[in-house]
Image (cartoon, rainbow, N blue to C red):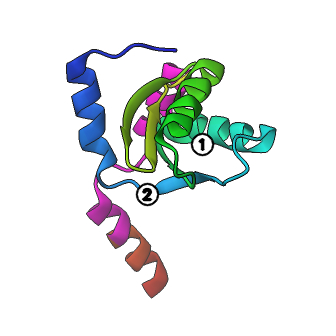
Amino acid sequence: MLNLSSDERRALRARTHSLHPVVSISHRGLSESVVKEINVSLASHGLIKIRVYHDDREVREQFLSILCDQLDAAPVQHIGKLLVIWRPPADKSAQATRARSRPIDQRSRKRSLQEGSQR
């Protein structure tokens, strides 16, 4: 399990406001397929919300600690029936390359597409 400082946790909580839960844990609990799906979501997003459909708070806390231990993630927040966990990207160089390959100026891209359709 990763440990976060209070400043890091605060910054991550601020980023989670606009997120929707990407995985749900039903009354049946943590199955192998649910853990795999959470792992895939963490790999692609890094910061995710998980909705837990269980009424017992202690069980939700156990889910949070089990997930963070198994997936080498950090618990960010447990509020109500939502769990927020974060894992740093595995390959920072690949993420930087993807960020650089995106178009910088969206207007020039739109204009170039419009010019191509008028021909």
Query: Quick check: 61 left or right of 8?
Result: right
Query: Which numbered disc covers residue 41?
Result: 1
* Image position, residue 65 (x, y; %): 54, 24
State the extent of the magenta-drawn residues as a range. Answer: 91-110
Q: Is residue 9 visible?
A: yes
In the foreground, 28 or 100 = 28
Residue 88 visible in the current orientation: no
Would you say the residues marked 2 and 1 are in contact, meaning their CB atoms lie under 8 Å apart?
no
x, y (%) of residue 15? 29, 43
Q: Tell me which label, 2 or 1, sits earlier in the chain.
A: 2
Name the amino acid type tagged 1. Answer: Ser
Q: Amino acid at mark 2?
A: His
Vertical placement of residue 91 versus 24, above or below? above
Mark 2 secondary-structure assignment? loop
Q: Is residue 100 magenta?
A: yes
Q: Which mark is residue 56?
A: none
- Tell me if mark 1 has few (under 14), some (14-19) or many (20+) residues whose alpha carbon lies within 10 angstroms of its own: some
**Pointer 2 residue:** 20
Q: CA distance from mark 2 to mark 1?
A: 12 Å
In the foreground, 77 or 97 = 77
* Image-based side of 30 in relation to 111, left or right: right
Q: Is residue 91 left or right of residue 105?
A: right
Label 1: which secondary element: helix
Q: Alpha-carbon neighbours of circle 2 within 10 Å: few (<14), some, or many (≥20)?
A: few
- Residue shown at 67%/53% (left/top)? 27
